[in-house]
Amino acid sequence: MVQETLLIDVKPGTEQEFENAFKKAAVIVSSAKGCLGYELHRCMEQENKYLVLIKWETVEDHVTGFKNSTDYQEMKSLIGHYYLHIPHAGHYEKVD
């Protein structure tokens, strides 16, 4: 299992619209091959900062499969215009 993390700063004043759009985008990503679930967290200190956690079976399911799909483009069109700048992203695996 791979944990994708995204640190997203949205344009100030668009937080509620972003959260509403994210709900629609989450339906898309959660139906992608290899997606095991997702979470959206809002920063308590800065309300326009978010942490998105998406669990994937493999990195390839995300990078090769989902990111090269029309579903990814649709998801990006729903939430991408709220980004203040390109989100910081990474893939992590649990250390035993």
Image (tube, grey):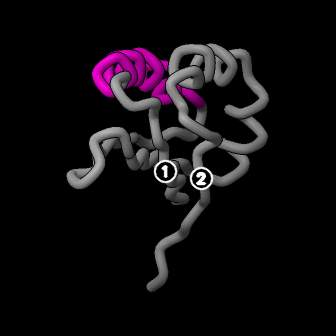
Kindly identify the residue that appears in the image at 37 percent across and 22 percent down: 14
Give the main secondary structure, helix, strand or loop, of the magenta stretch.
helix
Q: Which residue is mark 1?
A: 7
Image position, residue 17 (x, y; %): 35, 17
Magenta segment boundaries in residue numbering: 15-32
Q: Are marks 2 and 1 in contact (CB under 8 Å)?
A: yes
Image position, residue 49 (x, y; %): 38, 45
4 shown above or below 80:
below
Viewer-proximal residue, 68 or 14?
A: 14
User: How would you rate the neighbour count of disc 1 (Cα within 10 Å): few for under 14, some for 14-19, many for 20 or more?
Assistant: some
Q: Is residue 95 left or right of residue 66?
A: left
Disc 2 marks a residue whose amino acid type is His
Q: Residue extending furthest left?
A: 44
Kindly identify the residue that appears in the image at 47 percent across and 73 percent down: 94
Kindly identify the residue that appears in the image at 65 percent across and 24 percent down: 72
Image position, residue 58 (x, y; %): 63, 53
Q: Is residue 48 left or right of residue 31?
A: left
User: How would you rate the neighbour count of disc 2 (Cα within 10 Å): few for under 14, some for 14-19, many for 20 or more?
Assistant: few
Queried whether the magenta region covers residue 21, the answer comes back as yes
Q: In which image quadrant can residue 32 be found?
A: top right
Kindly identify the residue that appears in the image at 34 percent across and 42 percent down: 39
Q: Which residue is mark 2?
A: 88
Q: Is residue 45 left or right of residue 21?
A: left
Q: In which image quadrant can residue 37 be found?
A: top left
76 shown above or below 53:
above
Q: Earlier in the sequence, mark 2 or mark 1?
A: 1
Residue 34's label in the rendered image is: none
